[in-house]
Every structure is written in C-alpha cells, then in structure tokens.
Image (spheres, rainbow, N blue to C red):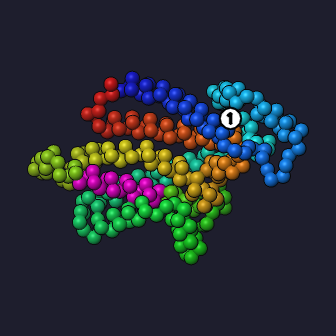
Amino acid sequence: MGRFIVRRLVSIIPTMFIIITLSFFMMRAAPGGPFSSEKEVPRGVMENLLKKYHMDEPLPRQYLRFLGDVVRGDLGPSFKNKDFTVNALIAQSLPHSVVLGLTSLTLALVLGVLVGVVSALRQNTAIDYTAMSLAVTGISIPLFVSGPVLMLVFAVWLKWLPTSGWITGRQGIRTLVLPAVTLSMPYFAYIARLSRASILEALRSDYVRTARAKGLSMPVIMVKHVLKGALLPVVSYLGPACAGIVTGSVVVESIFVVPGLGTFFVRSALNRDYTLIMGTVIVYSLILVVMNFFVDIIYGFLDPRISYK
C-alpha cells in the first residue's frame, strides 16, 4: 500500500507537466493577446509592454521561463489586474471556492447516500419513485437553469435567502445556501442512483441472506455488511464528481456573484490575461489530480480485496 501511495504521488508530477505544457502552447496559439483592444496601441508602447513581460522573446524561451517560475511557486503578475500578482489573486479567491466546493460535495454525498439507502429499503414504493424522480430531475436540469430558478423562488418570491453575496458579508452563512444547493444537485442525483443500485445488489447477495438467517437486525446488516461494499461505486464516482464541481463552480459563482476562483477564471479568459489563465488552470488541475489520488486511497481501504502491486 505504501509503495502504491508513493507511485501515485510521483505520477502527479508528469501529469501536471503535461497539463501546463499543453495549456501554455494552446493559449498562445489562439489569436489576440492580453494587450489587444479595440483602440490601437501605439507601436512604441506595445513594444515596451511586450519587453516588460518578456513576450518579445521566442516562444520556447517564454515557456522555459514560465516553467521555472512555476517550479519556484511564482505564477507571475496579472496583465489586467494592475499591482496584483496571480499568487495574490488566487490566495484571495481560492478559499471561497474551496468552501463552496466542499460544502456542495458534502451535501451531495450525505443526502445522496441517505436517499439511496431509503430508496433501496423501500423499493417500488411511493418513496422510492419520488426519490428517483427527483434524482432524474437533478441530472437533467443544467446548473445555469437550476441556479436562476432557485434564486427566483427562494430569493425573489419567498425572500428567504439573498440573491448574491458571500459569507463574509452582512447576510453571513445564508449566502452559501443557494449556490451550494445548486452546485450539489446533479451530483446528489448521481450518488443517489448509484447508492440505490449498489445497495439493492448487495441486499440480494448470499452473505446478506446468511446474516439474516443468523438473526441479525437490518440496521446491523446495513452498517456492517452492506454499506462498506455498496459504497465502492460511489467512491469511484467522487473523482469525476470533484471534476464536475470544480468546473461547475465557474457557472455557479458567476450566477450568485461569489468572489471565488471561477470568477477570475472567466474574467481572465475574456481579457486574455495569460498568467491568470495559467494560474487558475494549474490550481484547478492540481485539485482534480489530488482528489483523484485520495479517491484511489479510500477505495483501497474500503475494499481489502484490492491489491496494489
């Protein structure tokens, strides 16, 4: 197990190297640039700007310079946000995105498993049909639709929750409810369906029938025999779920005006702020790679049959 963990940790390095390399050259291959605007910039000013940010150098040299800065932990200055470095902007916004993402993932995981267990134990009843209908609805409706609808109902009509803002503001924790629920909806739905299917399969297995024959109660059977094996597909899904929550947070943060990393990612893409785009891509990619690493480790602890060779 220890050797597997070390190998997975080491594999993060080439993965991040490939992501950084492809992102750098794909971004530079696109037309336009950070200093392009509707108003023509004088040639002398443009030359000074390119020289200041080393963009007058050959592209391979720019890449090596950027790669060296990344290794040292320096993501460079932002081209559009004057007097701010990319490190400072990410440090300012990333905690908000992490709070939103972890809250959404926790909400989706807890409620999804709970609904899956109840649906499996009450198979083919009104509770089961209602829960699975909600799951299908959550999967079918995209975030850019469910977000405004929830805002319209709970913020505009009922006036229970604020339409925008963040927990550091006057409204406090209430501002987290709508974006977290919106972001968790499709992942709650997938987890609920996976949990239900896995638990139903486990309940029909021989070892569960044997446990029932021995007189064990259903709560004991569920906790000691069913859930541990039935949660394996859910754990496998956590990797893609993290990826979806990271990318989905860009949409949700824009809808609810959350001052997170997704907001800076959208602005940097629109403004062609090369360094800020690369900084956000690196952070997002690192989060996904690390979360997939943890999923692999958790999977091994849940299923002792897995041998890491």
Q: Which residue is drawn at 53% across and 28% down?
A: 13
Q: Which residue is drawn at 55% across and 53% down?
A: 249
Judging by the rendered image, the residue that carries numbered circle 1 is 75
Q: Residue at x 35, y 47 (%)?
A: 234
**Image location (x, y in percent) of residue 208:** 17, 48
In front here: 49 or 211?
Answer: 49
Determine which quarter of the picture holds residue 82.
top right
Amino acid at circle 1: Leu
Does residue 308 appear to the left or right of 11 in the view shown?
left
Determine which quarter of the picture holds residue 275.
top right
Instruction: Name the quarter where the N terminus is drawn.
Output: top left
In front here: 78 or 64?
Answer: 64
Residue 65 appears in the picture as rendered:
no
**Image location (x, y in percent) of residue 126:** 28, 70
**Image location (x, y in percent) of residue 131:** 34, 65
What secondary structure is marked by label 1? loop
Residue 203 appears in the picture as rendered:
yes
Does residue 271 appear to the left or right of 235 in the view shown?
right
Chain part drawn in magenta: 184-200
Mark 1 is surrounded, within 10 Å at the Cα level, by few (under 14), some (14 to 19) or many (20 or more) other residues, namely many
In front here: 40 or 277?
Answer: 40
Determine which quarter of the picture holds residue 23.
top right
Instruction: Name the quarter where the C terminus is drawn.
Output: top left
Q: Residue at x 39, y 58 (%)?
A: 189
The residue at the far top in this view is 3
Does residue 125 appear to the left or right of 299 in the view shown?
left
Residue 4 on the magenta segment: no
The residue at the far bottom in this view is 157
Determine the main secondary structure of the stretch shown in magenta: helix
Give the mark count. Answer: 1
Residue 193 on the magenta segment: yes
